[in-house]
Amino acid sequence: MTVERSSVSAIMAEEENLDPNTANHCPIQKHLPAIKAIRGGEEGASKEQKITCGGNGYVWKKSKSTTVIQHSHSFQSSWTFWFDTPSSKSNQATWGSSLRTLYTFATIEEFWSLYNNIHPPNKWVHGSDLYCFKHEIEPKWEDPVCANGGKWTMMFPKATLESNWLNTLLSLVGEQFEHGEEICGTVLNFRTRGDKISIWTKNAANKEAQISIGKQWKELVGCNETIGFIFHCNKTHSLCLR
């Protein structure tokens, strides 16, 4: 099942993995080994509250007598979370060799299960990087899809970092950008001098698409500052949006 662009935002706003049969809605806890490592190995859901996935839906088993089947909502593209840490970077032989994939998701339900089990940005260590890229595109400028592209970058204070990161993610996976086919993915960089979010694109020569993406992103996060676009193949060449 493919969710149309016009309806995906509404569905995502409603779909936060909630048990439809409880008065106090509780988020689904889908713990994965890679996510456990980030969160510190918390215990999974109780025996009374388990999730099993399969086919085009998942089954919420609240008790032996109650089983609710819900169908999943597919994105237009599959996406992969990647992670890089400062400790692994210091030991890498070549740039990017320390990058690790966390999980590939293709539905709204999978997205929320993952996002809700990752530490919020304000709890990550400086020097870490969290990426969300279209499946089969590696977050490296050496990747053929990224090689001729560039990136828009914004810096955010801790107070608004998490909300702007989430809004950026939802707009990308929900295909809300007019030139979404030009987007490779997004990265959240945790730095001592200031945390920043970037959107990577495929073809920097397509100036119309780059300007459109930058303008839409600024509107999305309510940015009134000037932001810059850097061409990967020629870092002395750049664009600015005011």
Image (cartoon, rainbow, N blue to C red):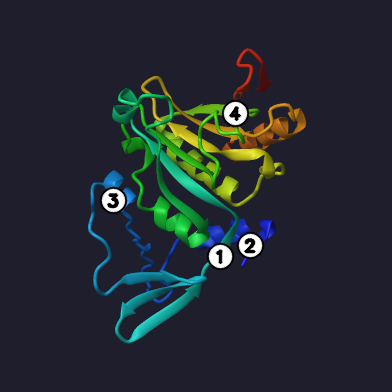
Picture mark count: 4
Label number found at residue 152: 4
Q: Position of residue 48 (x, y in %)?
A: 26, 75
Instruction: Tell me whether circle 4 and circle 1 mark residues in contact (CB < 8 Å).
Output: no
Mark with earlier residue (4, 1): 1
Q: Give the CA separation, mark 4 to mark 1.
A: 29 Å
Residue that label 1 marks: 73
Element type at mark 4: strand
Question: Badge 2, how many Cα within 10 Å: few under 14, some, many 20+?
Answer: some
Q: Position of residue 236 (x, y in %)?
A: 63, 12
Mark with earlier residue (2, 1): 2
- 208 left or right of 132? right
What's under tag 4, amino acid-wise?
Trp
* Above or below, 238 relative to 161: above
Q: Nearer the viewer, mark 3 or mark 4?
A: 3
Residue that label 3 marks: 36
**Quadrant including the N terminus:** bottom right
* Above or below, 178 relative to 47: above
Instruction: Tell me whether circle 2 and circle 1 mark residues in contact (CB < 8 Å).
Output: yes
What's under tag 1, amino acid-wise?
His
Instruction: Tell me whether circle 2 and circle 4 mark residues in contact (CB < 8 Å).
Output: no
**Quadrant including the C terminus:** top right
Q: Is residue 226 visible?
A: no
Label number found at residue 3: 2
* Above or below, 107 relative to 152: below
- 108 left or right of 162? right
Residue ID at (32%, 71%): 50
Q: Position of residue 225 (x, y in %)?
A: 59, 24
Q: Give the CA separation, mark 2 to mark 4.
A: 27 Å
Q: Position of residue 13 (x, y in %)?
A: 54, 58
User: Residue 52 or 95: which is nearer the viewer?
Assistant: 95
The picture quadrant where one finds residue 99 is: top left
